[in-house]
Structure formats: C-alpha cells, structure tokens
Image (cartoon, helix red, strand yellow):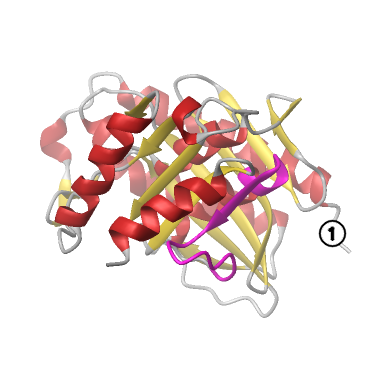
Amino acid sequence: MIDLKHLCKEIENAARETSSFILKESQGFDIRKTEKKGLNDFVSYVDKGSEKMLVEKLSLLLPEAGFVTEEGTSKKIGLKYCWVVDPLDGTTNFLHGFHPYCISIGLKDGEEVVAGVVYEVSGNESFTAWKGGGAWLNGVKIHVSKAMTLSDSLIATGFPYNDFKLLDSYMKCFTHFCKNTHGVRRLGSAAIDLAYVACGRFEAFYEYGLKEWDIAAGMLLVREAGGRVSDFAGNEYNLKGEEFLAANSTVYSEILEIVSKFMKN
C-alpha cells in the first residue's frame, strides 16, 4: 500500500526542484529557440528539459509506474500505476514572460487519479491532493468557494488556440457568462485554473480540447477540495480533457446546464 500523503511530499519536492530550472531559464529566454508542434502549439528546450528531470525523479519514487507525458520523454507502460505529467503548463505564457505557468503531476491507479501536485512556478504556490486526504496549498488545507449561484461567480476558461470546430458555440457560451457572472478570466494554464477553483479563487472553469496531462492533477484537487468535475454531458469518470468542466458543488449544476446548452448543440 502506497503512503499517498508521503508520496505527495516527494512529488512536491520533485516539482520544486524542477521549477528552479524553469525559473533560471526564464531569465532572458530567447523566444527564437522555440519549436512549433502545430498551429499555435509551441515547445521549448525548457519544456523538454523540465520533463526529463521530472521523469527521472518520479521514476525513482515509483519505479513500477508508467508515464503519460506531454513531450513524450517516456512511453513506459505501468501495469497498475501511471504518472501523468505536464512539465510546463502555460508554455505560451512562459515564452512571452507572462505569468502564470506551472508544473502538473498526477498519479493514476488504473483509471483513477489518486495523487496530484500543481506547482505554480513564479508564485511558489504548491497545490497538493491525495485520495481521501483533502487538498492543500503550501501545507494549508483548501476548499472550493461557498458561492451559491452563477451570478455570484468568477469563471475561468481557456480560449481555443488550434481547434476551432466549436468556436461559434464557445463564443455564445462565453458571452452568456460575461453577462451573467462576476466576470470571466483566461490565465492560459488549465492546471492553474483548476487549482484556483480548488482554493476558491474561481467558482468554475470550463474548456474543450484539453489533454489528460492538463487536467489530471487539477481535477483531483477540485474533488478533494469539495468540488465536482465532469465533461459537458455530466459524465464524471475517465475524463481525458476533450470536454472539461469544474466547479464548486453548489454552482456545478447551474454551469453544467449552461455549458451543455451551448456546447452540446
């Protein structure tokens, strides 16, 4: 039996050490050293270097575990456990010297995420959660907000950057939230958006076109902080990020109804 609380401390240490590398390389970073993976989809030697460091450190923590990584540093398959790693969520922010950006690490047992860390690099904020252990920010327990209605909520989202098939529906949904909430924010990092839902800075978050490494750690944070996550149809299991919604438990049904109305037509 894995001690998930202890393991989260070790994951946190690995993320903190790797964040030092990211911060160092952010000083005077030359955007011309960036590679393009696809339309508006970028990667730098910092992403790759960060991922390599994390894979090495996490392999020592749990040698039997496999990996799902954004940059493909390891394709090892684990029979039971699997690390899901985004070495630099918010790469475009990083390239332009704009904060926030983070490291996101989740551990899956089968299809269930049982441990997660989102480490916000510039702010030195470490969000951690493990199954049944609650969610924590720098060692202090956190909870989703107590807002009761969507009209009292601050919403986070991410704009499509290369998958525009639902853009018209997305903009209608976005317009509705602009008119009927305290506002909509777009930080450029889904993992941080979810961490902020977990600690009550946002009431809800929605986006489509995400990947598993964007959401693995963050969705555990939200759940352990008392919130709910699902796709746009309300399915709460085996989520990979194609459609993703997270909210505090009181606002969840209301935002799901709105997102489903616009995004599922």
Query: Is 7 within the magenta?
Result: no
Q: Compared with residue 259, is residue 72 higher up or lower down, i.e. above or below?
A: below
> Which quadrant holds the N terminus?
bottom right
Give the image location of residue 83, x and y in percent: 59, 61
Q: Compared with residue 107, is residue 44 higher up or lower down, i.e. above or below?
A: above
Span highlighted in magenta in the image: 222-238
Camera-side residue: 186 or 23? 186
Query: Is 232 within the magenta?
Result: yes
Disc 1 marks a residue whose amino acid type is Ile
Q: Compared with residue 186, is residue 86 higher up or lower down, i.e. above or below?
A: below
Residue found 23% across the figure and 32% down from its top: 95
Q: Is residue 100 left or right of residue 204?
A: left
Give the image location of residue 107, x and y in percent: 64, 58
Residue 186 visible in the current orientation: no
Give the image location of residue 210, x and y in percent: 36, 57
> Which quadrant holds the C terminus?
bottom left
Write down the residue under mark 1: 2
Residue found 30% across the figure and 60% down from its top: 263
